[in-house]
Amino acid sequence: MTVQNAVLQVGPLMPMVQTAITRDHDALQLPAGAGRSAFLADHASSITVAVTSGRTGVGTDLMQALPNLRAVINFGVGYDTTDVQQAVERGIAVSNTPEVLNDCVADTALALYLDVLRGISAADRFVRRGDWQTKGNFPLATQASHRQVGIVGLGRIGSVIARRLEGFDCTIRYHNRSEVTGSPYEYVPSLLQLAHTSDVLIVAAAGGASTHHLIGAPELSALGSRGYLINVARGSVVDQSALVKALTTGALAGAGLDVFEDEPAVPPELMALESVVLLPHLGSGTHETRAAMADLTLKNLRQYLADGTLLTPVT
Ligand code: 8YV
């Protein structure tokens, strides 16, 4: 028997989300490998709602294979893995989980900021290796307070990062597609100019085609050999090859990275560098925030199934 208006799980989800959609909505699970074609041949036409995460998404091919898809419910604020253009063209609604993760992602940016400038993780490795006893003092680091900080993307998360940095007496400027009305920070229309005037660039812009490699060799060179890059947005926003080159040649002082271009792959050249802090895309990864994201994901799904509208649509 074919289920009508079926809900489809696309990719891994938090256990509480997976349990809820299976228990309450009889969600089907899209097989990852060989069984996918046969599954789609059997079920594609019955699927009207897909529940996915920012890491997996409903990409171009899968969306095309689901002729009756009406909504994509995305766990995560970022939805660059979903083909939003096709969704708009076909009238498919897409939701995400904004706001609830602002604090934790901003906290992660600040953790990377302090760690990279002060060398906290490197100093921890220094102590564990026994170097304190054999080599003496840990090398001097860079002051984290009173810095010139450029925020790339002063959106919901970027604004919280800026507020946190005020506590460190930093001078904050930002670059955005357009000036943020009423912002207390200086808007710099040229990203290159922002890189020139910043000690640290913090990337908090959304991923996707419009920001692909927004930060490349020229911006990294403008940031310079005493400059630092922090990225808690998407790996795609930064030209990773250019970043690796700048870091390995000393053209950039250091970087704190929660995101990479081809996750979970991390360039091996970075593994050997003491000047970088590498995190496994954990920006929103706390019990509290992930529970709030799960809750908002399920609210969007339930509201869509009840009345065809979304609580937090992306378009
Ligand atoms: C999540 C994120 O880890 O919300 C986002 O966009 O990058 C993270 O909070 C991820 O989306 C979960 O798939």
Image: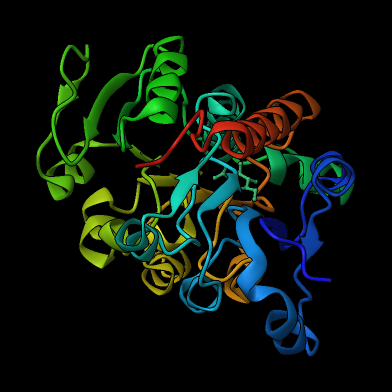
Relative horizontal placement of residue 205, taking residue 308 as reference (left or right):
left
Coloring basis for residues: rainbow
Can you say which quadrant of the picture contains the N terminus? bottom right
Quadrant in which residue 221 is drawn:
bottom left
- Count all numbered tags in the image, as a single digit: 0
Q: Is residue 189 above or below residue 299?
A: below
Relative horizontal placement of residue 15, taking residue 140 as reference (left or right):
right
Is 29 in front, or is 195?
Answer: 29
Q: Is residue 92 above or below residue 179?
A: below
Can you say which quadrant of the picture contains the C terminus? top left
- Residue 10 visible within the image: yes
Q: Which residue sits at x=43%, y=68%?
A: 240
- Residue 140 visible within the image: no
Quadrant in which residue 20 is drawn:
top right
Q: Which residue sits at x=49%, y=47%?
A: 78
Q: Position of residue 56 (x, y in %)?
A: 62, 62
Q: Position of residue 62 (x, y in %)?
A: 55, 75
Q: Which residue sits at x=59%, y=28%?
A: 101
Q: Which residue sits at x=71%, y=74%?
A: 43
Is 282 in front, or is 65?
Answer: 65
Q: Position of residue 23 (x, y in %)?
A: 90, 44
Q: Position of residue 76 (x, y in %)?
A: 59, 43
Q: Is residue 19 above or below residue 289?
A: below
Relative horizontal placement of residue 182, taking residue 127 as reference (left or right):
left
Is 278 in front, or is 87?
Answer: 87
Q: Is residue 222 above or below residue 154?
A: below
